[in-house]
Image (cartoon, rainbow, N blue to C red):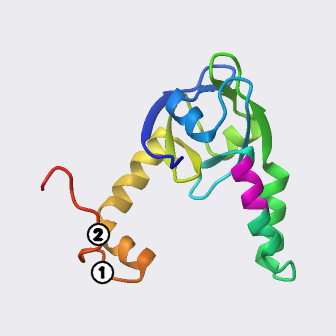
């Protein structure tokens, strides 16, 4: 299932985060399921199902280990990635080291990003969104290599 959406959440004193049922279903794991939390990009954390984490591992295995950046990324990523369980309330506990790395406070934002989730400090997400949203067309062109405003662009459902 394609993971999408933005969810404002709170982290409790024990660093527990409730993952919405819709996202747990999309990840293919409900209570008692296993997820992996790892450093993400742009000061976020990435949350993967076991299946998505294994696919990511396969992609990393295919990268040339003789490249310095590949070795550094692999070390940093796996050394900090941690396995967590979803409890009977649909929550996970964010490891302290990763919460510190992402500078998470009480208010966070959980994003569905295709095959994984991203967890952001709420203020950092707002800053990122303001910076990047104004450049949406430019970013789309760079990502797709063509003009995004062409006929293949998704239509605005609101008609604006």
The correct choice, above or below, for 39 with respect to 58 in the image is: above
What separation in Å lies between label 1 and label 2 (alpha carbons)? Answer: 9 Å
Q: In the rendered image, is residue 20 in sight?
A: no
Most common SS among magenta residues: helix
- Left or right, 113 with reference to 69: left
Residue topped by disc 2:
153
Could you say where residue 96 lies in the image, as x and y percent from the top left?
Answer: 74, 34
Quarter of the rendering containing residue 100: top right
Indicate the secondary structure of the residue bearing disc 1: loop
The span shown in magenta is 51-57
Q: In the rendered image, is residue 59 in sight?
A: yes
The structure residue drawn at horizontal position 54% and vertical position 46%, both measured from the top left corner, is: 1
Quarter of the rendering containing residue 47: top right
- Give 55 or 19, whichever is nearer the viewer: 55
Could you say where residue 157 lies in the image, as x and y percent from the top left?
Answer: 20, 52
Indicate the secondary structure of the residue bearing disc 2: loop
The structure residue drawn at horizontal position 33% and vertical position 74%, both measured from the top left corner, is: 138
The correct choice, above or below, for 27 with respect to 55 in the image is: above
Which of the two marks, 1 or 2, is nearer to us in this view? Answer: 2
- Left or right, 159 with reference to 87: left
Say if mark 1 contacts mark 2, CB within 8 Å. Answer: no
Q: Which mark is residue 126?
A: none
**Label 2 crowd (10 A; few <14 / some 14-19 / many >=20):** few
Could you say where residue 43 lies in the image, as x and y percent from the top left?
Answer: 59, 53
- Left or right, 35 with reference to 2: right
Sequence-first tag of 1 and 2: 1
Residue topped by disc 1:
147
- Give 89 or 78, whichever is nearer the viewer: 89
Could you say where residue 71 lies in the image, as x and y percent from the top left?
Answer: 84, 72
């Amino acid at each position: 299932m394609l993971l999408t959406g933005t969810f404002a959440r709170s982290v409790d004193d024990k660093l527990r985060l409730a993952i919405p049922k819709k996202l747990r279903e999309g990840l293919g794991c409900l209570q008692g399921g296993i997820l992996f939390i790892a450093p993400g990009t742009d000061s976020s954390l990435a949350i993967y199902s076991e299946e998505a984490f294994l696919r990511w591992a396969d992609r990393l295995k295919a990268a040339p280990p003789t490249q310095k950046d590949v070795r550094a990324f692999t070390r940093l990523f796996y050394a900090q990635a941690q396995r967590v369980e979803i409890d009977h309330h649909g929550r996970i506990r964010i490891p302290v080291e990763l919460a510190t790395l992402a500078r998470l406070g009480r208010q966070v934002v959980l994003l569905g990003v295709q095959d994984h989730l991203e967890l952001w400090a709420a203020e950092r997400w707002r800053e990122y969104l303001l910076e990047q949203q104004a450049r949406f067309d430019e970013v789309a062109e760079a990502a797709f290599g063509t003009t995004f405003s062409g006929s293949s662009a998704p239509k605005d459902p609101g008609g604006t």
